[in-house]
Image (cartoon, rainbow, N blue to C red):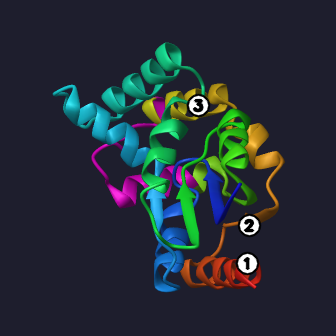
Amino acid sequence: MQALKIIGLVGMPGSGKTLAVNVAKSLGIPVISMGDMVREEVKSRGLEETPENVGYVSKDLREKEGPQAVAQRTLAKIKKEKAPVILVEGIRSLQEIELFKTFTSDFTLIAIHSSPKTRYRRLIERGRSDDAKDIRIFQERDLREINYGIGSAIALADYMIVNEGSESELMRKVQTILEEIMQ
């Protein structure tokens, strides 16, 4: 086992993971996004970064390479990091969690939860290229995430943050938890 501490972050799209990532970075914690691994694969296949293409590639990777495919790519990046603590954003399944736990005995999972109504509003406001622009695509993405097993990962998280309030409220909660984990 390595002496590395990995903090995993799980939550449905629009739950507030990006704000949590910003808090981690402000504390000097390097962040690796599992979604970036998928977006890199989308680009390497010469596809436009749309919600449909990102979803297709994410599903395709897992079908062809197994449920840990994206986590394997993430682990390759983790191995290049020199920091004693790394935050991995975008965990989707128990299989991914198990992969990280085989790499380090010091793994902690934080879940962020928000209602679908709140998350959809946030995604529309955020406007990232791979965000759903209509409710049908949003719901399809939610179902895809649920099929990966994200609900089980959220249910088994070491910490749960309900994010229905302000950005500053979420950031305070995340900072408190990260500081506790880092002790």
Q: Residue drawn at (59%, 71%), measured in percent from left and top?
A: 85
Amino acid type, callout 1: Ile
Give the mark toward the camera: 3 or 1: 3
Provide the residue designation for mark 2: 161
Mark linked to residue 72: none
Image location (x, y in percent) of residue 154:
75, 48
Which tag, 1 or 2, sits closer to the chain's start?
2
Is 3 or 42 nearer to us in this picture?
3
- Return the residue nearer the eye: 122 or 81: 81
Range drawn in magenta: 119-136
Give percent across and percent down for residue 89. Answer: 54, 56
Report how far apart the C-alphas of labels 1 and 2 lie in the structure.
9 Å
Looking at the rendered structure, the kind of residue marked 2 is Ile
Residue 61 placement, left or right of 109 = left
Secondary element under disc 1, as helix, strand or loop, is: helix
Q: In the displayed structure, would residue 95 be above or below residue 91?
A: above
Q: Which mark is residue 177?
A: 1
* Inter-mark Cα distance, 2 to 3: 25 Å
In the image, residue 15 above or below residue 70: below
The C terminus lies in quadrant: bottom right
Q: Residue lying furthest left in this view?
A: 46
Residue under pointer 3: 68
Foreground disc of the pair 1, 2 = 1
Circle 1/circle 2 CB separation < 8 Å:
yes
User: Upstream in the sequence, badge 2 or badge 3?
Assistant: 3
Q: Identify the residue at horizontal 65%, vertical 25% (top origin).
A: 147
- In what element is the residue under mark 2? strand
Can you say which quadrant of the picture contains the N terminus? bottom right
Density class for disc 1 (Cα within 10 Å; few <14, some 14-19, many ≥20) is some
